[in-house]
Image: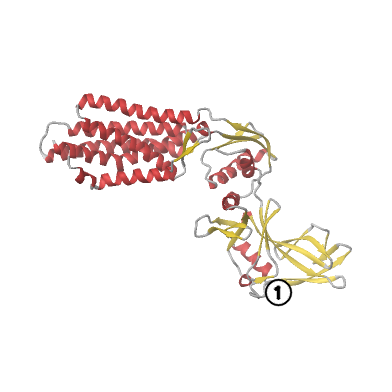
Amino acid sequence: MNYSKLLKDWRIVMLFIAIIASVIFIHPIYTLQDDGTATITTDIKKGLDLEGGVRALMQPEDPELIQKTINTLNVRVNTLGLTETRIMAVGSKYIQVEMAGLGEAEIREILEQQGKFEAKIIRHVEIKDGSGTLEFGGNYDVTLDNGTITVNDEILQMNDTITIEGIEFQYTNLTGNTVALTGLAYTGDDIVKVFGDAQHSSVQPTDAGYRFSFQIMVDSDAASRFAKLTEKVPVDFSTDISRPGEYLKENIDLYLDDILVDSLRIGSGLKGTVETTISISGPGETQEEAINNMRNMQAVMESGALPTQLEIIKIDRISPTLGKEFMSTAILAIIFSIAVVSIVIFIRYRDVRIVIPIMMTSLSEVLIILGVASLINWTIDLAAIAGIIAAVGTGVDDQIIIADESSKKEKTMTSLKAKLANAFFIIFTAAFTTIAAMVPLLFMGAGALRGFALTTIIGVLIGVLITRPAFGRVIKEIKEGN
């Protein structure tokens, strides 16, 4: 057999590239523990049955909004990439959430935020001799009397609101002779799109740690409100004398569930402009914390505010019902099955040159399936393991077809090519039949069925596109060398 020629074949090269890429995506790390035991960790995400997690039982303030709340939570956890999550109604009053690989603090951070996002700009009004002027569109008289103000003929106590030219203002503070009227620029309902790609988001080091930033797109009404609120805000020439006039005197304050999360300077170039794309930023003591804070805020903005407040009744730790021992046992079972099949094939063909490629091809399929799962952040659970076993079993059947067709007695090169072509016709037909059977489960099935369907489809595609052609090329080289 001409190994040099075989290793240069594009099908073999593609198989090697897929194997190397899969190892990189799986990212196995060998660690020696203090007690002398060794462990291997990977980037493969494991499900609740294999890794454990947490279960939270929550009670919505308004039980009639349970299904809408579940839909919002699903969008939020999907944005965070938490694929192994089960959210379901329990009776008519409760919602249960199960998440793999998380602790109590993490699940509370995700679920306890109602997600009410607001961006506000304070307008300060100087009071002299009991009155002042709010410069906003038109000019509005503001009078002060013993802590009570009158704006546009409406009397406001502290924290009362008033709507002026379609924008809601709240009387939020009185410092000396300065009245603070906070205008609502944006809300979560105004967000059209949340950008999460590298071009529109970043995490940068600062003197105080790290700071994240990402962009969102708001609708035209919100952009018009921002333009109105900033149109008559003075430019600040005093804060930084090295860069005079770069910012406005008022900031834009970001609130999440009525808690101030950040206060941003407004560039003077944005004064009075209708801007639909704005930047959101926030801090983090470490890079990882900044990234997590950014992802959580993006998820909240993407999903929108929960339609009702949630009260967490209890949180339980879910122990893995099977654990890592089952994962190891499942992999050993797959290897053992391949070995048994290889023995049967050796008895049938009496040629170790056929047996070894079958074993190597099957093991390669398992490795590549796990690599693809790591790449797409797919969670390996019981259903996925069943899909892997099904895909490997289909692969062994296909390899037997190739080996059997190539072992028939025709001697000519044309006959060998014809037999291999016939084998691949059978293989591709069977593969597309399997995929067609899995597609309905993928789009309409429940969580476990979707996991089985997706893993099976991935395994079949890897087989027909990568491993089967490579195996066929090896068998062709073996038969031509006889």
Residue 134: x, y in percent? 76, 70
Quadrant into which the N terminus falls: top left
Residue at horizontal 61%, vertical 32%? 317
In the structure shown, which secondary structural element does the residue marked by tag 1 occupy?
A: loop
Residue 381: x, y in percent? 47, 34
> Which of these two is toward me, 418 or 142?
418
Residue at horizontal 19%, vertical 26%? 350
Using a 10 Å C-alpha cutoff, classify the residue at mark 1 as few (fewer than 14 neighbours), some (14 to 19) or many (20 or more). few
Residue extending furthest toward the left: 412
- Which quadrant of the structure image shows residue 245? bottom right
Residue 19: x, y in percent? 34, 43
Quadrant into which the C terminus falls: top left
> Which of these two is toward me, 72 or 298?
298
Kind of residue sitting beneath label 1: Ser
Scheme of colours in the image? secondary structure
Residue 158: x, y in percent? 82, 58
Residue carrying label 1: 238
Disc count in the image?
1
Q: Is residue 336 left or right of residue 273?
A: left
Residue extending furthest toward the right: 146
| Rendered position, 163 above or below 342 | below
Residue 123 visible (yes or no): yes
Residue 458 visible (yes or no): no
